[in-house]
Amino acid sequence: MSRPVPAIVILGNGSLATARKIQQVYPGALIHGLAERVDGADRVYREFGVTLRELYQQDTPIIALCAAGIVIRTLAPLLLEKGAEPPVLAVAEDGSAVVPLLGGLGGVNVMAREIAAALDVAAAITTSGELRFGTCLLNPPSGYALGDLELGKRFVSDLLAGEAVRIEGAAPWLAQAQLPEDAQARLAVHVGHAEREPAPNELLIYPRNVVVAVDAGLEDVASAVREALHQAKVAVQSLSCLLAADSEMANPTLREAALELGVPLRFTSAGADVGTRLRTAIDHPVSILGNDTVVMAVAEQPLDPLQIGRPRGRLAVIGLGPGAAELMVPAVKAELSRANDILGYETYVRMAGPFRADQVQHCTDNREEMQRARHAFELAAQGRSVVVVSSGDPGVFAMAAAVLEALHESTDARWHNVDLEMLPGVSASLATAAQAGAPLGHDFCVLSLSDNLKPWSIIEKRLDLAAQADLALAFYNPISRSRPWQLGLAIEIVARHRLPETPVVLGRDIGRPGQTLRVTNLGALTPDQVDMRTMVLIGSSTTCVFPRVEGGEWVYTPRWYGEKPTS
Ligand code: SAH
């Protein structure tokens, strides 16, 4: 059963060697290096605090190669907010010390031991139970669930006070622990899937060895599952996943039920009866229990939900923003880290990376949008988590519309069942406007000057009307080698309705290395100042310009139109 891949965060080149050794313990973990301080990191960040907090909030285990104090201070504002937390460790730059800081229940001590072993030092374990017994009793391995944390804490303190313990049921991971075992002990660790009232002298641990097959026709799926488990005297904590038929993949009732029960939802082809479907989806010997509407399979061993049926596939069409990592929204970063497949124009896929070895990159030419969209659905329909990347915002002259067009044209139910979501990004016009001030501060019109997918006549008409309407204008795709003359004509059309002094902003490679921002005016604007990596913003009749103290100018379009309001 897979654990989340940790992030290794370093501040300087001095930590790189230690970071690489730790990376060998967690293949797939990326080394995040501070910009301009670290050469050859897998991923570059600018702000330590922001980066660490973001990782923490995404539940990513953190291995920070720096002073424990820095990590504590950085994460302190977040610590009160949250019950569950990812493991967080501080490791000395030279690898001489490994200090687990947070995430005791998320297995931080296990990680500390793994890292310490690789670095050939001792982990600074400070958890008493862990020290004494060699394991954290409250953190059973995956595949098992702790009954109750508060009762568990009391149980461990009784043990620490010197009491002995019995083990009931199969707890293979405790074989190596140094527990004071005694068959007559008052305290007992009880491992089993039977429904049971917790007694004060018992630590209940449930194997997740039960799968329930459900049908979306039920009125209240979660309650029906609880009731059926109760009837069969099976603990709800032993539930590993819900299993439903493929045809019900997009059903919101099932999704909500799985969420409420806190288990994954898996799918299988609709077979004969539910019992057979369950038996075929699980390649372990199971006994089948239940009633007419809810059927369950109980195995001897914990069941890994990842091995049962398949998940609902996901397709996210994401916007990277203009380029700089700080301008990428956190939801997009999280989506990129969960993706199995990444599709897009090579330049953008590279911008979205780097990726782990287990993530598949499918780079294609910029013009193959429909083919890329169909390929994305094919992958997602297999249950994979797929990301299609666009620069800026995916809904602005980019992949989101192509993906929807592909779906609209398709009658394939598997495609329509995919969990499809668009995640927005900062579009080039907005990124450029922000750098110039607020040239789009009032009504504006966004146009692509490319006549690849629309006739030039419609572009001329729209330009003419938008210029006449005195809207500020944002031109995407202003010019290219195959479209050399269109921009000159566009400028002419706008100039029929606007004065030569009208402010113009040219943003090139905004948010990327070597970005330039230039403020000029309509009279001075010529196509040779513009290329395909440029955003052209043309002001309205109210757009103004004034000098900035640090040099250059501020450009803005006031919020009002006509008479300036008083105050
Ligand atoms: N989806 C993108 C736009 C794709 S169209 C977005 O929302 O930004 C491509 C055009 O966008 C380019 O021809 C250029 O005009 C503009 N563009 C994209 N990225 C840019 C950047 N970083 N700086 C300036 N213009 C950019």
Image: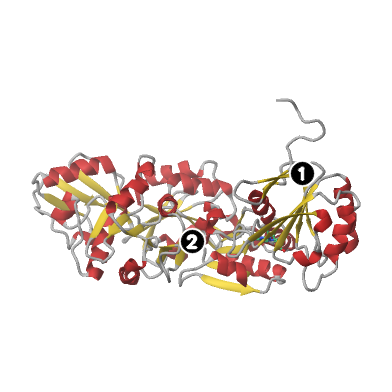
Which mark is drawn over residue 337? 2
Q: Residue at x 35, y 39 (%)?
A: 80
Where does the C terminus fall, quadrant-wise?
A: top right
Residue 177's spot in the image, x, y percent? Answer: 16, 59
**In the image, residue 114 lies at what x, y percent?**
26, 65
Secondary structure beneath label 2: helix
Q: Amino acid at mark 2?
A: Ser
Task: Give the SS element for disc 1.
Answer: loop
Q: Residues within 10 Å of mark 1 (few under 14, many from 20)?
A: many
Q: Badge 2: how crowded within 10 Å, few (<14), some, or many (20+)?
A: some
The residue under the point 43% across, 49% down is: 57
Q: Report whether residue 217 is seen.
A: no
Q: Residue at 28% of width from left, 53% of height from top?
A: 68
Residue 23, position as x, y percentages in the image: 35, 69
Q: Single out the residue that lies furthest toward the top.
A: 567
The residue identified by callout 1 is: 543
For residue 405, what is the image quadrant?
bottom right
Q: Is residue 543 above or below residue 530?
A: above
Question: What colour scheme does the image use?
Answer: secondary structure
Name the amino acid type tagged 1. Thr
CB under 8 Å between callouts 1 and 2? no
> Which mark is in front, 1 or 2?
1
Is 491 above or below relative to 258?
Answer: below
Q: Position of residue 105 (x, y in %)?
A: 29, 51
**Which disc is residue 436 wearing?**
none
Which quadrant of the rendered structure holds the N terminus? Answer: bottom left
Eyeballing the image, is 64 above or below 21? Answer: above
Under 8 Å from ligand 1: the CB of mark 2? no
Q: Compare residues 448 and 505 and report the one nearer the observer.
A: 505
Relative to 66, is 461 on the left or the right? right
